[in-house]
Image (tube, coloured by chain):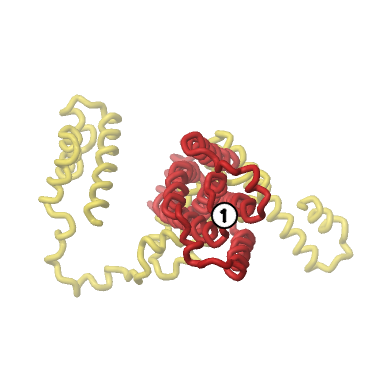
Chain colours: A red, B yellow
Amino acid sequence: MTTRQTTDDLIRDLAARPAPARFHPTAAAGGMASLAALGLGLFFAGLGLRADMAGAWQHLAVQAKTVLPALLSVIAIWLALRSARPEGHIKAWPLAVPIAAALALALQRLVVADGPRLAELMGNTAMACLASITLLSALPLAAGIVLLRRAAPTRPVQTGALLGIAVGAFVAGGYALHCTEDSPLFFVSWYGMAIGLVGASGAYLGHRFLRW
Amino acid sequence: MAAFAASLSRDCPALPMSVRVLASGMEDRLQQDDLWETLLARANDGDGAAFARFLHIVTPTLRAVIRRRGGGLPPDQHEDILQEVLLAIHLKRQTWRRDAPVRPWLYALTRYKVVDAFRKRGATVTLPIEEFADVLPEENAAVPLTDRDTEVMLGLIDARSAGLVRAVALDGKSAEEAGASLGLSAGATRVVLHRAMRRLSGFAERMMK
């Protein structure tokens, strides 16, 4: 049987090759977080934190603007790294916790707002917000995809999307320290859209580069 | 766990036979898992012999998985898929965590590669061509890759490699003969040929798309 022979040859060949590079999930997460933090640091150095930071931090909405994305980011990166191993099947529902809290906050604002709600939702800096979050996410996301090529996700699109959400949310939480638009209607919509865009990019990159 | 199963089957003769058989089956499997895990751990530390043994030991299991899922494909493709799985085990072996059981990891990896392999080959039912050989017209025989295509592709790689490929693959010379005329050793010729063929198959894949 000739096929049997070639399989034995293949095994001999594979055994002679050096073991491939190891996959370090914590190093991957650390690398991405450092790159994202570096980008935000440069952004703050150029454009600064919001001037009224100390006073504004008293408000729940201002805290939520940073804390909810940060929470989303931590959950998403944890899920992404777990899904990066073949046997790692994940349940995505923990992501719903910060998302539900954000939606509840926006809904509550929608009910109690007294001015024109559409103007409040549109704000004045929506495009700057979208552009900043997506651009600052590009490099850490690309790095994350490269680092995860050593891993073995059996659902590459899902893993890529989670990676994108993790990076987008991390950057959004940092960008919030610069942004002075404090209405939940504004930040839930636009931060949410930016995180969604980065997540979609991650899904696409996962489809392209995380299959093996 | 293995020790527990062993003591259960040894020390408790009063247990019903079926329970003792079950326990000893469990014991075998756990010992087997221990062996698989030891071998793969040593392989990942750079022990090639351990890795070869690991691949040999898991091959029957992989064959069974492929056979079970591979109803639509002819058996001769099963061996190809097996080799794809073995290659994937090598490339991704470092994603196995030493403190985790090896079986779920191996099965998940195998499942992914097998599904992928079947998808790549298309969901179409492949029928053995021999049964239709006398019905099919002959004139299509040379269509897929014409001489012109071959020349175009050979033009894409360097002249020396193209010459070797032409001599060996098209004119049917041996690697030694073809290399001697260029002053290359047989080993060096094979390396050049191998690289050339790999580049050519890359081009071919792109041309097909």
- Mark 1 — residue? A182
Residue B150 image position (x, y, % from top left) = 15, 48
State the residue lying farthest toward the top. B183
Dot 1 amino acid type: Asp
- Residue at 28% in and 34% down: B190
Q: Is residue B97 left or right of residue B202?
A: right
- Which of the two residues, A171 or B121, is positioned nearer the viewer here? A171
Q: Is residue A31 left or right of residue B158?
A: right
- Residue at 13% in and 46% down: B152
> In what element is the residue under mark 1?
loop
Residue B145 image position (x, y, % from top left) = 17, 55
Q: How many marks?
A: 1
- Residue at 20% in and 35% down: B161
Q: Is residue A4 shown to the viewer in this render?
A: no
State the residue lying farthest toward the bottom. B135
Output the chain of dot 1.
A
Residue B182 image position (x, y, % from top left) = 17, 27
Residue A42 image position (x, y, % from top left) = 48, 35
Q: Is residue A196 left or right of residue B208?
A: right
- Which of the two residues, A57 or B14, is positioned nearer the viewer here? A57
